[in-house]
Amino acid sequence: MAGPGENKPRQPMLTVREALDFLLGAARPVQEVETLPTLEANGRVLAQAQVSGMNVPSADNTQMDGYAVRAADCASGAATLTVSQRIPAGHVGQPLLPGTAARIFTGAMIPEGADAVVMQEQCELAGNLVTVNHAPKAGEWIRRAGEDITHGSVILAEGTRLRSPELGLAASVGLAQLPVRRRLRVAVFFTGDELTMPGEPLAPGAIYNSNRFTLRALLEKLGCDITDFGIVPDSLDATRAVLRQAASGNDLIITSGGVSVGEEDHVKPAVEAEGKLNMWQIAMKPGKPLAFGEVQDAFFVGLPGNPVSSFVTFLMFVRPFILKLQGVRDAAALAPKTYPLRADFDWLKADRRNEFLRARLNEHGGLELFANQGSGVLTSTVWADGLIDNPPGQVIKRGDTVRFIPFSEVMS
């Protein structure tokens, strides 16, 4: 007779989309807000929409070095005008009289009376007379006030992640400070008696802890405040103790390894004892096992121990989860963008899982595949430019169009 649970059917694996939707649905963005100088807000998430208090440009100005003129004075295409004034950027000229031109430099305000700018290459200067060898149209080479931004318009939405373009935009309307959500506090630790830190002797059967370096670098790139508890011994009591410490004052706990069901895998029972846990089998390769739960007030994510599996599951799940916790609202900013590119290889062994294949662009605009796609082959992540998102059951033939996720989309 079968024992209890021996014939219990296995739960179906979640799709990548199902697992990501669950994570994003569970995320609770941090609520604390601080005001920072705009110069110090790089990488932070905007807590309130920002409205422009001015027009940009603030006044009509020239796009070119040249001469501000009245278009009607130059209708002949060879008009000679008196140069009445010189207007550098940052200076205000006098009203332009009929029959005259103003020497003007890029960014300078258009003087009253002028309605066009003629670039200097179309003009000939002799003394204080300029011959305009062009018949300009009204408005030529003039940037209009408010052409870029109008007074009262929203320039940055709440939940925007601030990068160099957003900071420049904020500065362009005079915003010296910005309200942002506080940094996310993330605790990390790594389980396994076999783990050794670089610089220490490598005992027989031991491995260097590469995941610590990979995951910390990814978290730093996301602007997280990191508390690193290092390597935790393979002990239930030790794991529970570190979990309690990690949950105190942190928003998220991330581990790698120890979430399987072996006798030395203590993370799963430790999280279940200190909080609650969902264990998932995700239909993806690499990275099938993923744990998600809570310990006290902190979220918990347990990543696989294999280095490529840990790396890929972080990019596909943990990164968007962190962005949501940080307050990012735009769904398009949470999901990695994919680009249709040509496969310059054959991949004829279809898998029932969603595969993420390490690949790079070649000089012909196609994708080449790293020869060894094993979950422990960390060299593939350095060689590659990104991941091919290959659907379940899909073979790839040379010339097929595939979905490519550049690392530049998911490592910034």
Image: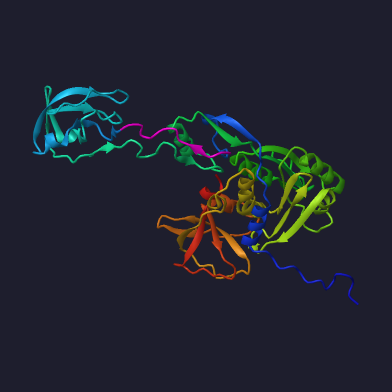
In the image, is 295 to the left or to the right of 349? Answer: right
Give the quadrant of the N terminus: bottom right
Please state the horizontal and vertical placement of residue 359, each as a whole percent of the image: 52, 57
Question: Residue 275: x and y, percent?
Answer: 81, 49
**Image quadrant of residue 389?**
bottom right
Q: Looking at this view, is 5 or 210 the one in front?
A: 5
Residue 389 can be seen in this image: yes
The answer to whether residue 228 is left or right of residue 355 is right
Give the color scheme: rainbow, by chain, secondary structure or one colour: rainbow
Task: Decide: is 284 above or below 324.
Answer: below
Q: Nearer the viewer, residue 197 or 123?
A: 123
Magenta stretch: includes residue 48: yes
Name which quarter of the figure residue 74 lies in. Answer: top left
Judged left or right of residue 40, residue 219 is: right
Regarding residue 199, the answer to whether it shows in the image is: no
Q: Give percent across and percent down for residue 118.
A: 19, 35
Q: Position of residue 340 (x, y in %)?
A: 46, 60
The number of numbered badges drawn on the structure is 0
Q: Main secondary structure of the magenta part?
A: loop
Residue at the (29%, 29%) spot, across then down? 109
Pick the residue in front: 16 or 128: 128
- State the image quarter where residue 116 is shown: top left
Residue drawn at x 71%, y 37% is 227
Q: Which residues are magenta?
A: 47-59
Question: Dividing the image into 4 quarters, which one contains the C terminus?
Answer: top right
**Residue that sits furthest to the front in the current view:** 152
At x 32%, y 31%, the residue is: 59
* Residue 229 falls inside the magenta stretch: no
